[in-house]
Image (cartoon, grey):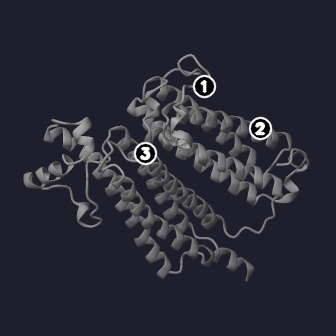
Amino acid sequence: MLRFQSLQDRSSATAIWLGFVALLVLAMVVVGGITRLTESGLSITEWAPVTGALPPLSDAEWNRQFEAYRQTTQYAQLNAGMSLEAFKGIFWWEWAHRLLGRLIGVAFALPFVVLLAMRRIPQRLVWRCWVLLGLGALQGAVGWWMVVSGLAGRVEVAPERLTIHLGLALIIFVGLVWTALEAASGENRSHAPTGWSRAAAALLGLVFVQCLLGGLVAGNDAGRVFTDWPLMEGALFPPVDWSRGAAAFLHDQGLVQFMHRMGGYTVFLAVAVFVIQSLRTRLADGVPRVAMNLFGAVVIQALLGIATLMTALNPWLAGLHQAGGVFVLGLATWLLWCVRRSHPRLFSSSIVSATAL
């Protein structure tokens, strides 16, 4: 009976489905980042969840879309005189971004209905899937709320709204990865020490915040200034326009980039300490291996970030850097999951307790 319950609590089909959707979300974040880099996000000025899935199919429709874009502040101040062919170049990026969002919705909803009807989803995970479906629907609305902020009076979307849009995508990604792992492995009946669980959760939180800071950098075009490293135009701290008050933390290019740099250093040091401690205490259940993989990914991500900065946002490097950020977040999620799955006897928690983790 116990064996039957254990088998019923796992579902490889559910794990594969959720893992595939997580990969689509990763791709969505990268395409969204390229859309921002190419200033393409305001090229479609209407929200048509159903009919918008089809691109313009006639010259008349292309001219209608172009005329709508010509009414925006971005066109007037940045792209006045743009040709129809040039407009098509930015239109396709935004259209692809929205199409990928629709595909993610279909890739999640249809298998969800089928697997639910076949009772292939472990009962304890059904509510999580409903939450993920709801968050996906909310993400579409948040995306349009972001676009609206740039259609009048601005030449780009509001950085804080872009960051919220990115943050929600990352929350969905983490939820997909975690639920896929749960579906593949069955219910967790271990009781990992609180200290190590908190430490791994703190790492995940740090990586998430660092990704949000990256969103602010993208939203403010802050990667195009202070393109030297490790200093910022020869100084440790950039000049900041404090006349904005607290809003400088969201809108000042130098300060936003500085925070992202400091966030990167913090993540690097925190992961390094976790790896050292996990090796010293000889943690089992694959925790040190996952931690070392995370550290390696953080190093590569840092190098990509530096290269992206020093090339003034080379599109290919920037795309890899954005993908790397999501990948690091996925590894941090996996690390926390592994820690929470480990058995107490495999831990020597005295070091963690002594450092008040």
Residue closest to the eye, 335 or 271: 271
- The x, y position of residue 114, in whole percent, is 44, 77
Q: Which residue is mark 2?
A: 273
Q: CA distance from mark 2 to mark 1?
A: 26 Å
Judge whether 57 appears above or below 256 on screen: below
Front tag of 1 and 3: 1
Q: Identify residue type, mark 3.
A: Val
Q: Identify residue type, mark 1.
A: Phe
**Label 3 CA crowd tier, 10 Å (few <14, some 14–19, many 20+):** many
Judge whether 234 appears above or below 68 on screen: above
Residue under the point 40% across and 65% down? 105
- The x, y position of residue 74, in whole percent, is 27, 42
- The x, y position of residue 222, in whole percent, is 46, 33
**Numbered tag placed on residue 30 in the rendering:** 3
Judge whether 163 appears above or below 312 on screen: below
Callout 1 secondary element: loop
Q: Is residue 158 left or right of residue 211?
A: left
Q: Is residue 41 left or right of residue 12?
A: left
Q: Which residue is mark 1?
A: 237
Callout 3 secondary element: helix
Q: Are marks 3 and 2 in contact (CB under 8 Å)?
A: no
Mark 3 or 2 closer to N-term?
3
Mark 2 or 1 closer to N-term?
1
Residue closest to the eye, 140 or 10: 140
Q: Are marks 1 and 3 in contact (CB under 8 Å)?
A: no
